[in-house]
Amino acid sequence: MTANLLDFDLEGLTAFCERLGEKRFRAVQLFRWIHQKGASSFDDMSDLAKSLREKLKNVAHVKALDVISQHISADGTIKWLFDVGGGNAVEAVFIPEEDRGTLCISSQAGCAVGCRFCSTGHQGFSRNLTTGEIVAQLWFAEHFLRKHLQRDERVISNVVMMGMGEPLQNYAELVPALRVMLDDHGYGMSRRRVTVSTSGVVPMIDRLAQDCPVALAVSLHAPNDALRDNLVPLNRKYPIAELMDACNRYLAHAPRDFVTFEYCMLDGVNDQPEHARELVELVRRHSRGGVWCKFNLIPFNPFPESGLHRSATEKIQIFAKVLSDAGIVTTIRKTRGDDIDAACGQLAGDVMDRTGVGERMARQRTIMLKPVAAPSKQVKET
C-alpha cells in the first residue's frame, strides 16, 4: 500500500524520505512541489532526481478528494462537496473579501457534539478525517482558485476550522494539518490567520496551546449553563466556568490577544437583551484586565429539523449594542452564499441522511456532478 503524501507535515515527510535513503532537502523539495505548486504527478517535479521520482512512484502518491459538486454563489462564495468514501461527504467553503480569502474546512464526517442549531450535528457522526483529507480540502481549493481566478500568487490567506465536525475531537489528525498550513515550505500562513473553532473541549484547548497555538474561536451561544446545556450538550461535561478559564490560559500562548466567541442568534431562545447583559457579566467575571475577547454574532441558518428560527435583524442589532456599550468588541457576521446553502452541513445534509445513507447517496449521485480528482481538471459550476 502506497502512502498519501498529503498525510505528512514536513517532519513526517522528512522521516518518510529518510526511510527511502533520501536527505531532508529532498523532503523540502517534495513538500514545495505538492503544496506550493499543486503537483500530484512525480513526473512534474523536475528538480527531483529521476531515480527518486521512480522510487516515489512505487511507494507514494498524492491523492486528492473527489469533488461531488461545486456551487458558486452570486456573491463569489464557492462551496465544494467532497467524497470521503463510505457514503460520506464533507464540505469546504471559500469566502472572498476585499482584503482576504478565507477557506472554511471540515475536520470530521458528521459531528458527535450534537448542537441543536447545527445541521451537521443532526446528521450524526461517521468518522474522523485523516490529516490528508483535511489538507486535501485546502490543496484542492488553493490550486483550483489560482486557475479559476487566473492568479499566480496565493489566493487563500485565512483558514478557519469551522466546517463539519469538532476539530479538537480529531486532535491527532488536526495538528499535523495545521503545521502544513503554517509551514513556510507549505502554505506559509500566519498563526493569526489560522483559526480553530471548538465547542469547548477544555483539555484539548490546553494541549493546542502547547502543541500548535493558532487563533481560537469558541462556540459559546449562551450566557449560562442551563441554556448552554440545552444548546451545546458538551457543556454538561465542560461547563462555562471551566471553558472560560481554559480560554484565559490559552491567551498566554495565542498569536492574538483575544479569543473570539461565536454566538448563533436564535429567535426567542438566546437573543434577548437580558441574555446580552448576562454575557457582559460573564466576561467581566472572568476578565484578567483589558479586552480579552470578541463576540461574533451569527444569524442562524434555518433547517427544518432544528425547529429553530433566525433572530430578526433588529433584535440582533439591539443585542450587539448591549455588548458594544459595555466595551466588548462585537461584530455581526454577514450571511454569505445563502443561494448555495453555504452554511456548514446544509449541502451534505441533502446528500447524507444518517437514517438512509446508501439509498439517498445513490439518488443524489444521479443529479450531482461527475467527481473531479485534481484541480488540474475542470470542475463544472452550478
Image (tube, rainbow, N blue to C red):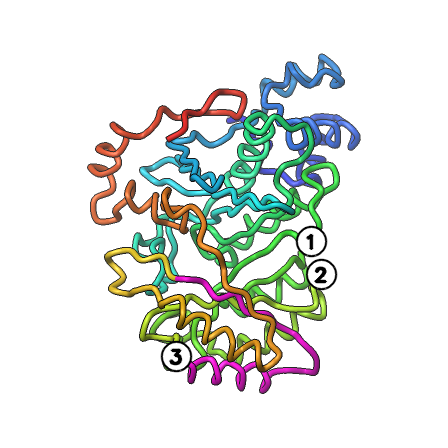
- Residue 20 magenta-drawn? no
Confirm or deny contact between disc 2 and disc 1 (CB under 8 A): yes
Q: Residue at x 65, y 18 (%)?
A: 55
Residue 66 point in image, percent of width and height: 43, 29
Label 1: which residue? 191
Measuring from the top left, give residue 100's x and y in whole percent.
63, 46
Amino acid on which disc 2 is placed: Pro
Task: Find out whether the residues at labels 2 and 3 contact each other: C-beta distance under 8 Å.
Answer: no
**64 lies above or below 111:** above
Residue range corresponding to the magenta coloring = 273-299
Q: Earlier in the sequence, mark 2 or mark 3?
A: 2
The x, y position of residue 227, in whole percent, is 37, 78
Amino acid type of the residue tagged 1 in the rendering: Arg
Q: Which residue is mark 2?
A: 255
Residue highlighted by disc 3: 272
- Nearer-N-terminus badge (3/1): 1
Q: Quadrant of the C terminus?
A: top left
